[in-house]
Image (spheres, rainbow, N blue to C red):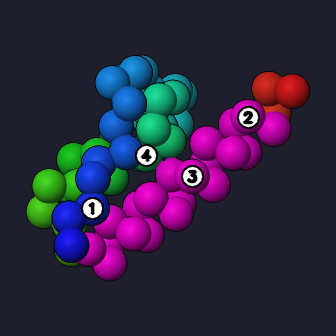
Amino acid sequence: MVIDSPCVRNCCLDEQDVCLGCGRTIEEIIRWGDASDNQKKKILTDSKKRTEKRKRHQE
C-alpha cells in the first residue's frame, strides 16, 4: 500500500519549524521518503492534529 505525502505545495515553516501547508515538522518532512508505512501513518495523524489545532486558534 502506498501512502501519499500530505504535501499541498504550500511550504512555509512557522516559528516551531512546522509546515503551514501540511502540518508536518521539518524532521517529518525530511524522514518521509524513508519512513515505514506505520511511521507515515503516525506522521499523518500528528500533522492532522497540528493542522486542526492551528485552525482552532485562528478562529
Amino acid type of the residue that numbered disc 1 sits on in the rendered structure: Ile
Quick one: which residue is furthest to the front in this view? 1
Q: Are marks 1 and 4 in contact (CB under 8 Å)?
A: no
Mark 2 to mark 3: distance in Å?
Answer: 11 Å
Residue 48 on the magenta segment: yes
What residue is disc 1 on? 3
Q: Position of residue 1 (x, y in %)?
A: 21, 72
Give the foreground label among 3 and 4. 3
Which portion, as a residue range, is magenta?
37-56
Residue at 12%, 62% (x, y): give it: 34
Residue 2 is left or right of residue 49, and the answer is left
Q: Position of residue 17 (x, y in %)?
A: 44, 35
Residue at 32%, 65% (x, y): give it: 40
Q: Are marks 1 and 2 in contact (CB under 8 Å)?
A: no
Give the foreground label among 1 and 2. 1
Amino acid type of the residue that numbered disc 3 sits on in the rendered structure: Lys
SS type, badge 1: loop
Residue 56 is left or right of residue 21, and the answer is right
SS type, badge 2: helix
Amino acid type of the residue that numbered disc 2 sits on in the rendered structure: Lys
Residue at 53%, 60% (x, y): give it: 46
Dot 1 or dot 3, earlier in sequence:
1
What residue is disc 2 on? 55
Mark 1 to mark 2: distance in Å?
Answer: 24 Å
Q: Main secondary structure of the magenta part?
A: helix
Q: Which mark is residue 24?
A: 4
